[in-house]
Amino acid sequence: MRVYRSVDLKNWEYRGVCLPRPENGFGRLGATGRGHVVYNERTTTYVMWYRWNPLNPVK
């Protein structure tokens, strides 16, 4: 999952990969949705979550 930032929502700066795809095992195949980040005031931390869809083999 790649990360970008913008101060005006028009011009974007690439910031790197925050969650690389595994090379082996569970999670190697499939697709992720757009990640979401929110600030948790109670814990004073940022929280990220995303949707992952496994690859469904065709038989």
Image (tube, rainbow, N blue to C red):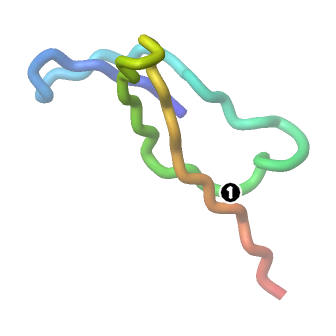
Quadrant in the picture for the C terminus: bottom right
How many numbered marks have been drawn onto this rendered protein structure? 1
Residue depicted at x 90% and y 45%: 25
Residue positioned 21% across, 19% down in the render: 6
Residue in the picture at 89% in, 40% down: 24
44 or 50: nearer the viewer? 44
In this picture, is 59 found above or below 28? below
Q: Which class describes the residues within 10 Å of circle 1: few (<14), some (14-19), or many (20+)?
A: few
Which residue shows up at 77% across the image and 48% down it? 27
Report the residue marked by disc 1.
Answer: 30
Amino acid beneath label 1: Gly
Residue closest to the far bottom = 59
Which residue is at the far right?
A: 25
Callout 1: helix, strand or loop?
strand
x, y (%) of residue 30?
68, 57
Q: Position of residue 10 (x, y in %)?
A: 12, 28
Q: Is residue 44 above or below residue 51?
A: above
Residue in front for this viewpoint, 5 or 46:
46
- Position in image of residue 16 (x %, y %): 49, 17
Residue 42, image x and y in percent?
Answer: 41, 19
In this image, 50 relative to 15: left or right? right
Indicate left or right for 34 with 17 as reference.
left
Which quadrant, please, contains the N terminus? top right
